[in-house]
Amino acid sequence: MSNSLDEMPLSRPDRYTLAAMQAKAALPEKKVRKEQWRDLTTTLVLPLLTFAIVIGVWIIVQQKFATDLPTPLDTWHRAVTLFSDPFHDAGPNNKGIGWQLLYSLGRVLSGFFMAVIIGIPIGFLMGMSNTFAKAWQPLIQILKPVSPLAWLPIGLLLFKAVNPSAIFVIFITSIWPVILNTASGVKAIPDDYMNVAKILRLNSFEITHKILIPATLPHILTGMRLSLSVAWMVIVAAEMLTGGVGIGFFVWDEWNNLNVASIFVAIFVIGLVGISLESLMMLLHRRFDYNAR
Amino acid sequence: MNYYLSLEGVDMNFQTQKGTFKALSNVNLKVNQGEFVSLIGHSGCGKSTVLNIVAGLLQATSGGILLENHEVNSPGPDRAVVFQNHSLLPWLTVYENVRLAVDKIFYNQKDNEERHQWTLEVLHLVHMEHALEKRPAEISGGMKQRVGIARALAMQPKILLMDEPFGALDALTRAHLQDSVMEIHANLGNTVMMITHDVDEAVLLSDKIVMMTNGPSATVGEILDVKLERPRKRLELADKPDYNHYRAEVLRFLYEKHKKAA
């Protein structure tokens, strides 16, 4: 539950603070343009500089210490090859990187949605009933810190197939943040809202869909966002173990082929997909967060 | 004589870790229809407890509440509450917050268009028709409280309960809202019970000021009938001897007879 607190949106926009007003106080136009120019340089040039330095270090390390590493140029060429035909399909062992990503995303999303469907009701029960919360809290506290990969053998035993097992691992990964954030969201509903409901004599169906759900939605979405980013990390490791088509196994396979340039490309692409998932969830969050609007 | 609202020997005990805390003891109060009654007292004297019992949000340990000769002991729209911190639902717009109440209460009596019109009408009463599509986070504290009042009025309550409705507002905003409440009371003639700890507010708005003794075992100390003519204008009243007399009465009660050890 601790992480849900850091992720909680600020209840008040800070646009009324003195600092914010000072920043917005009228500046001469020339100065404004200068400020904008400086903003552009800092947001664009500084990151590029960091990239350049890292590539520089990479080149030095490659030449002096680890000649097995591919050079940045090799990696670039490899990336061009991989992305020239990302969706080629020559049988189960030879699919383009686009397919690998889609298969992994498919597993992540299936496990994630199952966790959402099952986790939200459990979270609601925990938030609404102290008895239920007391009964479940210790079990969840014990299971939450366990690496989801520890569940992979259990999945294999239960489902006798690798694909459902990987989805099962993602399900386990995603369910804890969903449950805990939903529960803390329900607990955080002010008594006043419930008093309003009582005075209006709302029935339990109306209370649920007019008060509980809208009041909890921002917390639920925070839980979903946390789950999804962790799930994307876990799928790579899970697929390395399960094999099959998927970006995790792709990494492992290319290692077995000693094709390290591909691994670098994959790392970069995994990162990009991760950012995209995160921003997608942020968009969704902003859409439904009444505090942020 | 039958009263519109009557509190009959209300006791309220709370169970705490140190044992039973007797908050209210034998509170009796009669209110006529259309009367504006203020409850005043030092903080912690149980004013809010009285209001919550009338609202049905708390159940009296013994004694009871009669509204038009019927006992009430659970919350309902006939006793609408304006909460101190407005308690508007932050995900709904101003219009939707009021419409929620209107839809729930008049679903069977009014059709869609009538409910829409009624929502606009009460928002017009509190002068908030310019901000229908704003969300609570986008309007000022005073405006939120206006919408809170509109939502309560929308229920056409038999009695309007206000729990320190202007306590969190600055003095100027508070004055504006007091004027609005007087205007609404003059137009609709609602029965109002308001909690306050502001002596001027109590004298300005009320027909009757109920002064409560300090807790524990708080009860009604004195009742002051305020016979100032309506409509009341705060500027004119400031120089009037009766106004100052009423003020002095309340102050004497609070600071001489039932001074709170600070």
Image (cartoon, rainbow, N blue to C red):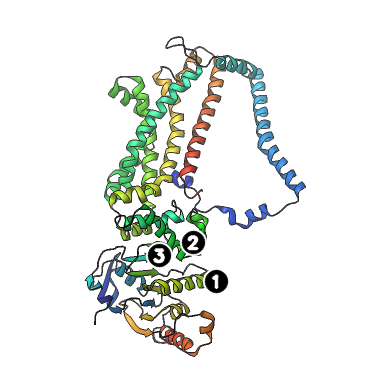
Residue at 38% x, 64% y: name it: B152
User: Where's residue A235, x and y in %?
Assistant: 43, 26
Mark number for residue B128? Answer: 2
Specify the farthest residue to the top.
Answer: A90
Find out whether the residues at labels 3 and 1 contact each other: C-beta distance under 8 Å.
Answer: no
Label 1's element? helix
- Measured in 3D between alpha carbons, the distance from the residue under mark 2 to the one under mark 3, in whole angstroms, is 18 Å
Graded by Cα atoms within 10 Å as few (under 14), some (14 to 19) or many (20 or more), the crowding at tag 2 reads some
Residue at x 39%, y 37% (from the top left corner): A145
Q: Which mark is residue A291?
A: none
Q: On screen, A90 above or below A125? A: above
Amino acid residing under circle 1: Leu
Residue named by callout 1: B172
Measuring from the top left, give residue A275's x and y in whole percent.
Answer: 53, 32
Mark 2 and mark 3 residues within 8 Å of each other at the beta carbon = no
Q: Identity of the amino acid at label 3? A: Phe
Q: Which of marks 3 and 1 is nearer the N terminus?
A: 3
Task: Report x, y in % for residue A237.
Answer: 44, 25
Label 3 CA crowd tier, 10 Å (few <14, some 14–19, many 20+): many
The residue lying at 42 percent from left, 83 percent from top is: B254
Q: What element carries label 2?
A: loop
Chain letter for the residue marked with disc 2 in the picture: B
Image-based side of B64 in relation to A293, left or right:
left
Q: Identify the mark at residue B83; answer none if there is no mark.
A: 3
What is the chain identity of the residue bearing mark 3? Answer: B
B103 or A158: nearer the viewer: B103
